[in-house]
Image: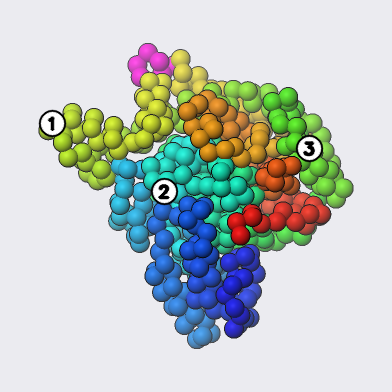
Amino acid sequence: MTMTLDLHSRTAHELRDALRSGETTAVEIAQSYLDRIADVDSRVMAYLDLWEEYALEEAGALDERLAKGEDPGPLAGIPIALKDNFCTTHGTTGCASRILRNFESPYEGTVVTRLKDAGAVLLGKLNMDEFAMGSSTENSSVQPTHNPWDIDRVPGGSSGGAAASVAADEAAIALGSDTGGSIRQPAAFCGCIGMKPTYGRVSRYGLVAFASSLDQIGPFTKDVEDLALIMNVICGRDPLDATSADLPVPDYSESLGREVSDITIGLPKEFYTDALNDEMRAKVDAAVAVLKEQGARVIEVSLPHTDYGIAVYYIIAPAEASANLARFDGVRYGFRHPDAKTVEDLYKLSKSEGFGREVQRRIMLGTYVLSSGYYDAYYLKAQKVRALIRQDFDRAFEQCDVIITPTTPTAAFKLNEKIDDPLQMYLNDVYTNSANLAGVPGVSIPCGLTDTGLPAGMQIIGKPFDEETIIRVAHAYERNRGFDPGKPPLE
């Protein structure tokens, strides 16, 4: 048997191969990750609910099945952690909010069931911006998460705990949710891979809703081969989610290693403006040059309604949030204020103390734009512009196979730098939220380090339900980029 010391630093597919060859056991793998969490999470603060005993029990059961010659599944023994908005029957599901503190879900989400059926070992729940509303994970009601590359900086959000856990080797794979960039932006900040699949590609059953027409579940991984591995498990039609697409799911692993000489890359001119940090632009330009050297054709395309993306997003998403979060009323479950004497008191006090400032801000904004007299002026108009944004992508994809942009305008910013300036915080999603509005898939992949040693991310956006091509292009870049993105200096 191998020593457990280095297991946490390996990719999921390396762990899979080591387990199947008899080099190690599922228990050793789980213990290596638990030891790693014990060693570094007091600085990273990625976990909210760690399932140490549960993980070791599940790993032990997998080892027994392997000893009998059984095949427990494609994720056998792989330690995976979940954002705190995934419903699980083990542990708590709190959305990093006081209003759901210590809530135990009576049912399990479809994606969680698929992970368990595939043999994954679940490590626990990860920190997030409360109800997925934020870009820095500073809006968690429990704790801020720190970027493993520089613990004085944010990991991004809202899935900051998930991104940080993978970057810090505290999970082999993590699952998060992406409503306006909440997987891709923290993946870029933390130097790992993060994908938002096409809306409808992955079941949302068991994901606590923020904005139901925008939310999508997706993975964080250490490399593109791991991305293909986990996508093969989580994608596909689910009768429990009416919005999940009844379309065949390809074997994404077959996309790996394929050439890109027949691929046309579109660079949207609206993304490459003076607002983009020079260093980030240089990193993305260099990454595109790598793909061009592999034979890909590069053209300029236009997404003319890009400038309206932030405004449209911050009308539609809060409107849907105000409806979705109305269920947290202090009556049926969640936080109930002890001083309430009337029904009006119960609603007012429970929501005022149960929800944090950013969640309250978005509920109020959403309720306003849906109110009588303002619905047509704001919400209806935003939906019309959303349709135009989708048409922009449709027209661009008539000319190209994928669109490449920066993932974020800058590298990770410092903790507390933007928390009191909501507009500056919202602008972190300027390159990511249009993919949610259009329902198209996108991935962020590391494309280098800045002069200050912080990761930069490149975003590859694809046609609806064409994650296969995104993975193909991402893998071609990964294997030809000519540098090792390295590990955060947590040691």
Amino acid at dot 2 = Asn
| The one of 352 and 75 positioned closer to us in this rendering | 352
Q: CA distance from mark 3 to mark 2?
A: 36 Å
Left or right of 128? Residue 276 is: right
**Region rendered in magenta:** 371-376
Q: Which mark is residue 282?
A: 3
Q: CA distance from mark 1 to mark 3?
A: 60 Å
Dot 1 crowding, Cα within 10 Å, few <14, some 14–19, many 20+: few
Residue 331, image x, y percentages: 20, 40
Label 3 element class: helix
At x 41% / y 53%, what residue is drawn? Answer: 48
Q: Earlier in the sequence, mark 1 or mark 3?
A: 3
Q: Which mark is residue 97?
A: none
* Residue 329 lies in quadrant: top left
* Residue 353 lies in quadrant: top left
Tell whether label 3 touches label 1 (CB within 8 Å).
no
The correct choice, above or below, for 377 with respect to 472 in the image is above
Dot 3 crowding, Cα within 10 Å, few <14, some 14–19, many 20+: some
Q: Please give the residue where the numbered disc 2 appears in the rendered image.
A: 85
At x 34% / y 55%, what residue is drawn? Answer: 92
Label 2 element class: loop
Q: Please give the residue where the numbered disc 1 appears in the rendered image.
A: 342
